[in-house]
Image (cartoon, coloured by chain):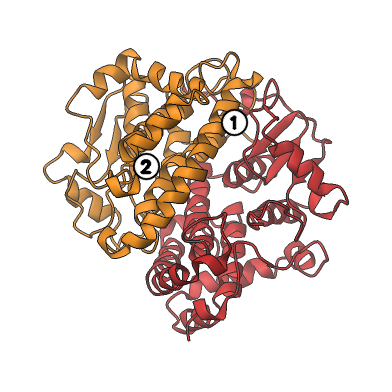
Chain colours: A red, B orange
Amino acid sequence: MTESPNKRQKRTGDDEKYHLIYWPVGLNPTHQLINFSGEHIRLVLEEAGVSYTDTASLKDGIKQVTSHISASNDGDEGNPPPLAPPILQHGSLTLSQTPNILLYLGQQLGLASKEPNGLYQVNSLTLTALDGLSNEPHDVHHPVAVGLYYEDQKEEAKRKADDYRENRLPKFLGYFERVLEGPASKGGEYLYGGELTYADLVLFQTIDGVSFAFPKCVGKLKDSGKYSKTFALYDRVKERERIKAYLGSDRRQGYGMGIYRHYPELDDQ
Amino acid sequence: MTESPNKRQKRTGDDEKYHLIYWPVGLNPTHQLINFSGEHIRLVLEEAGVSYTDTASLKDGIKQVTSHISASNDGDEGNPPPLAPPILQHGSLTLSQTPNILLYLGQQLGLASKEPNGLYQVNSLTLTALDGLSNEPHDVHHPVAVGLYYEDQKEEAKRKADDYRENRLPKFLGYFERVLEGPASKGGEYLYGGELTYADLVLFQTIDGVSFAFPKCVGKLKDSGKYSKTFALYDRVKERERIKAYLGSDRRQGYGMGIYRHYPELDDQ
């Protein structure tokens, strides 16, 4: 009964370029968050060394984003409409949802595991990193409503930030430390199977984000020595040749007002 | 470069039973939420008509759950430790994360689409339904901290509930209506490709959940006629032979104190 998804897929030519559709920095007109999710997609494309376009650097980029997510777009024969960016176009395929795009690209670009059933483990680790180190940090500064400004939910944010720093962040870092200590990591350098997968890129990016948002808290957690394998993985990814070049380029964007925001009142005092 | 994940997978025999590891009703000892995510897995197994075990109905079920998520479990050669249930065991494979387990089962059981690249579209629709109609309703009654009681965050919950009912719930229902109106649904009876996939089961379950939590609000939204295809899909899934039998059985659990809770003060007044 099991069928291979790729055998069933319409192959897009290997020469088809990848197109990332995402908010240009600071240009989201709808007062919603520019949520930095596009960055996960960029890191995978950069690590793989493939050519791609990115609406974040196009003059009319914003128009492409809004036309994709317009209420008048109901998709096409093969593609339902996307609810929100990031959106990936590759040949005739239009995909949305960050972990879904990563699942596709990971297979396309050889950044999912080659281990038996490894793809599912990489997907699971990715979903967990996004839950605890991306979605939750976002909710810290927007606990009531994504459509309201931070200033209109500051009190609630303070309470949520206390819980996040004291309970949730250590819980998730402790989980990844345990994954790296476990036998399925095959040595503890990368999360799964002894080689880099896109889950490692996601973990790198999310730790980079929480370090920006909560520098004092993350500094203390790092100094505690309890999460040494996790922070070593962060350093290891950061020093990879293509990642290092990307981080030093003008394609890498600042955090701005996205998922990861640094409000000193929400960090350790 | 693209490799089939299934070709790479260690095949577990077709005769291997599926084992769902999830909190027995009312027996979660850690004051965390019994979050009803296991229900998505059950619906897929029930629709497929396969045999499975479920710790929710075992006397020592709770022990199995806590041993899997214990801080002393670091997994095995092929499987990282799970952070939280639901957990699926199938042969030597141990998987966690709801959308990830659904991705695996959908392929195993013929409930992912057979369309080219359909698997990714089904995964995307599933992630969106879980985001907006499961994670967000959960956060409505726990906006500050999952480790605190609802009674300790009632004020914040009231504000978040107002936003959820006024903005977020209509946004997500409107999105799925648009998906059903679009050509990729192939007729608007099911979300993708003209046939039932696990994304339809997830949408059914999440609408059932928000209807339980916010009956007045959902009643009004239904009566508005704006989401007629979406509510028709809900009815269509509910009437499927195996789903109907399951919903009428004692295997189907009540909502209790999980993701979906009915607090009248959080509904329309």
Does residue B151 lie above or below A13 as drawn? below
Residue B121 circle label: 1
* CB contact under 8 Å: marks 1 and 2: no
Q: Position of residue A108 (x, y in %)?
A: 69, 40
Chain ID of residue with mark 1: B
> How far apart are labels 1 and 2 at the CA level?
33 Å
The residue carrying mark 2 is B268
Quadrant where the N terminus of chain A sits is: top left
**As rendered, which of A223 and B235 lies closer to the eye?**
B235
Q: Badge 1, how many Cα within 10 Å: few under 14, some, many 20+?
A: many
- The residue at 79%/70% (across/down) is A248
Q: Position of residue A226 (x, y in %)?
A: 42, 77
**As rendered, which of B216 and A206 lies closer to the eye?**
B216
Horizontally, residue B117 falls left or right of residue A248, namely left
Horizontally, residue A45 falls left or right of residue B120, namely right
What type is the residue that disc 2 sits on? Answer: Asp
**As rendered, which of B190 and B72 lies closer to the eye?**
B190
Does residue B40 lie above or below B256 as drawn? above
**As rendered, which of A26 and B104 lies closer to the eye?**
A26
Determine whether the residue tagged by mark 2 lies in a helix, strand or loop: loop
| Pointers 1 and 2 within a single chain | yes
Residue B85 in view of the camera:
yes
- The residue at 43%/61% (across/down) is A179
